[in-house]
Image: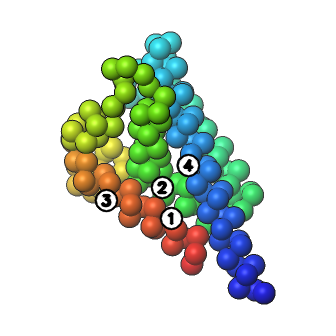
C-alpha cells in the first residue's frame, strides 16, 4: 500500500511539474508576442517583459511549493533552466504562428542561431552572453535537464 501511495505521489508531482512548464511556456509565447506587438519588449539589460515573466515564474514556483513541496518546484525550475520551456515555446510557435512566422524552430534553433541561451547551465559554463549555442547542445541539455527533474521527483 505504501508503494502505491509513493507512486501516486510521484505521478501527481510529475503532473504538477509538467503542467507548470506547459503553462509557463504558454505565458511566454503569448506574453512575448503581445509585448513585441505593443512595443513593450525591448532587448536592453532591463527588459520589462522579462521582469513580468520572472514574476510569473516565481508565482508558479511558489504555487508548486505550497501545493506539493520543494521537489516539484525544483523540478519545474530545472526544466526551465535547461531550456525545456523554451522548446515548448518554439512548439507553440509552430502551432500558433501563421505564414512566414511559422518555422521559427527550424529557422532559429535548428539553424544554430540561438544566442540568448547564455543563462542555461551550458551557457554559464562554456559561453558568454551573445555566443551561439548549437542545436544539438540545446537538445542534449534539455533532455538531461528533464531527466534530472524526474530524478528530483523520484529520489
- Upstream in sequence: badge 2 or badge 4: 4
The CA distance from mark 1 to mark 2 is 6 Å
Q: Is residue 111 above or below residue 67?
A: above
Residue 153 image-quadrant placement? bottom right
The circle on residue 140 is 3
Query: Which numbered dot is residue 79?
Result: 2
In space, the residues marked 4 and 1 are separated at their CA atoms by: 11 Å
> What secondary structure is marked by label 2?
helix
Q: Which residue corresponds to the image point at 60% horizontal and 57% vertical from the top-left? A: 17
Observer able to see residue 114: no
Expressed as whole percent of the image width and height from the top left, the position of residue 84 reads: 44, 51
Residue to which mark 1 is pinned: 149
Residue 24 at x, y percent in the picture: 56, 42
Q: Mark 2 or 3 closer to N-term?
A: 2
- Secondary structure, mark 1, is helix
Given this view, does label 2 or label 3 mark the residue nearer the observer? 3
Examine the rendered structure and indicate whether residue 119 appears above or below residue 15: above
- Do residues under tags 1 and 2 come within 8 Å of each other at their CB atoms? yes
Marker disc for residue 62: none
Mark 2 and mark 4 residues within 8 Å of each other at the beta carbon: yes
Extreme residue in the right direction? 1
- For the residues marked 4 and 3, what is the alpha-carbon distance in whole angstroms? 18 Å
Amino acid at each position: 500500500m505504501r508503494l502505491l501511495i509513493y507512486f501516486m505521489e510521484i505521478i501527481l508531482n510529475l503532473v504538477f511539474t509538467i503542467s507548470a512548464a506547459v503553462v509557463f511556456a504558454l505565458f511566454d509565447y503569448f506574453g512575448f508576442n503581445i509585448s513585441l506587438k505593443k512595443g513593450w519588449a525591448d532587448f536592453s539589460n532591463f527588459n520589462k517583459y522579462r521582469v513580468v515573466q520572472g514574476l510569473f515564474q516565481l508565482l508558479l514556483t511558489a504555487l508548486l511549493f505550497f501545493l506539493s513541496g520543494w521537489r516539484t518546484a525544483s523540478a519545474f525550475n530545472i526544466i526551465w533552466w535547461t531550456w525545456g520551456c523554451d522548446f515548448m515555446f518554439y512548439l507553440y510557435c509552430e502551432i500558433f504562428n501563421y505564414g512566414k512566422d511559422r518555422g521559427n524552430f527550424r529557422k532559429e534553433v535548428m539553424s544554430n542561431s540561438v544566442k540568448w541561451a547564455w543563462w542555461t547551465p551550458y551557457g554559464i559554463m562554456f559561453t558568454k552572453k551573445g555566443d551561439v549555442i548549437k542545436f544539438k547542445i540545446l537538445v542534449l541539455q534539455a533532455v538531461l535537464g528533464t531527466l534530472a527533474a524526474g530524478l528530483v521527483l523520484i529520489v
